[in-house]
Amino acid sequence: MITRLVWHELKSFFRSPVAAILTIAMPLLMTVIIGAAVGNTTVDPRTDVRVMQFVIPLMAAFGVAQGCFGTLAIHLADLRDRGWLKRLRGTPVPAWAVLAGLVGASLVIAAVTVAVLLGVGVVFYDVQLVWRTLPALLLTLLVGAASFTALGFAVVALVRGAAAVQMLGTGLILALAFISDIILVGGRLPAWLDAVSRIFPLRHFAHAIGDAMNPFLTGTGFYGDRLGVLVVWGIGGAVVAVWRFGWERHPVTASTVRTGRDHRARPQGRPPAWRLLADQVAHATTRLRRDLSTVFFTVALPVLLLVLISLIFGDAEAGGVRLPLFMVAAMITYTVGVAAYVNMVEAASGDREKGVLKRLTGTPLPPWAYYAGNFFSALWITLATAVVLGVVAIVGYGVRVVPSMIPGMLLAITLGTACFAVLGSLVSVLAVKQQTANAVALGTFLPLAFVSDVFVIGGELPGALRMIGDAFPLKHLSHALLAVLDPAGRPWPGADLAVVAAWTLVGALVLAVVRRIRISKKAPQQLPAPGIGQQSTLSGFEKPEAE
């Protein structure tokens, strides 16, 4: 039973592109980009030890923690909310077998992640395996994976709702990675933040793996203090999971009484354009507000990154300006990409797969109002986040913003939001399934963020990666925002804005061609709907048939 359940969970995991990207592909991608940025020079010519000898262990620790804690907690909460766990309680499968299947799949995924990273390190980066510490490395990986798995169950036991679990599971690991010597290596943390990082297990796990693969250290590689921290956290997580874990979704109390609402009948006929647009903006905003994980990654994460990176490297410079100012431009660019591109893809492809967009063809809502509603929702959310970032940078780090910067910033944000909204609409139309569309969005946006001066990783990128960043609009949007926010004054970023505008026009043209092709294919089979809501077939509103 356990073997079959583990195999079932593994197939479910690898059939979910988003989960596979966040758990396995993301640490590998970060390894490749960091390796390209910092180089793989020889640290000691006598032993031929290279820089990546100390990067691979950190990425392995991050991958294990993400897979055993974040991915497991999100998957488990989703199974509970969809009633899958409750239905299993009515089958002959015992509860312990179900949990053992989930734990076994989590450990296998962690082992695959570590094996992939070590294999890439040995083959492409000349990483050396320290054979005398191999038993300690394996034990550390096993204890760490078991500890983070227990903590994943504990989070699901304590937190209600899959959205809240997703926000906490992924957001907590990412935040801890910044202060646990994984993403920002070499940064000097403030005393209080360093003390906080020592409380949590991720830093001890990363250091234990790194020391076990450090050829310059002596001994067997067993560090009882670090393993002890992992064991204590694992036991605590297991106790909480046994105490509070539930197989059914937590009851949600919601009031059905709506007050202050105008119940007067609306006039017959098609509503005016401004009413359609306003309703769509309100609908898109409400959907975002109800999804806590999306709110975290869109609004809270950029503010968190600004604070953390500015605290750690506050006196440094990037792009010729102080780091806090650079981070304001970078995080506004990040928010534009997530709000207008990633979220647009998720919303449009999800609505199409659920049949929502197809049903809209029988309503007075024209296609432009649907997409325009998502665009203006992303625009005002980005502007609100930009205001918060600016206030934090001004109050906390002395960044200077003058009124003359505001028009250029508004123009760059509006143009960038339009560009990524068009590209997100195009991805949602071309992708057959929602999971595929989400994987394409994350798989294109996150790598570009690392090579487009959005995520600060240090070092000068090689020419090939710089060329990739120059070819896409994300880097040009970041440079345009930095130019208009630079208090020293820079030339007007007309070239960068022109590249963003060109991507917008080309994307809109391709989107129109795809829609026309879809309409021409389906037109002979469609009958016009009578009445007020009659309108042509909306390309991209129906799910494409799989070939």
Image (tube, rainbow, N blue to C red):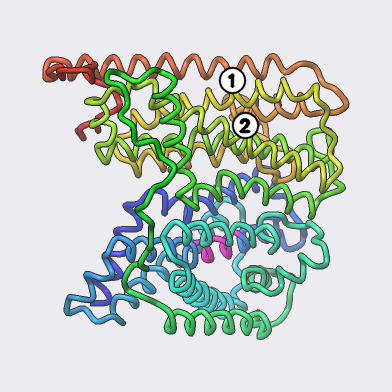
Picture residue at 32% right of the left edge, 63% below the top: 79
Quarter of the image that includes the N terminus: bottom left
Q: Looking at the picture, how far across and down is residue 359, in whole percent?
A: 23, 32
| Residue ID for mark 2 | 464
Q: Secondary structure at mark 2?
A: helix
Any mark on residue 150, and which? none
Q: Position of residue 104 (x, y in %)?
A: 37, 73
Q: Marks 2 and 1: which is nearer the front?
A: 1
| Magenta-tinted stretch | 59-66
- Residue located at (51% from left, 62% from top): 169
Q: Quadrant of the C terminus?
A: top left
Answer above or below: position of 530 versus 324: above
Determine crowd level at label 1: few under 14, some 14-19, many 20+ residues with C-alpha closer than 10 A.
many
> Under tag 1, what secondary structure?
helix
Residue 500 shows which numbered tag?
A: 1
Q: Is residue 60 magenta?
A: yes
The quarter of the picture where residue 348 lies is top left
Horizontally, residue 335 falls left or right of residue 487, namely left
- Height in image: 227 above or below 368? below
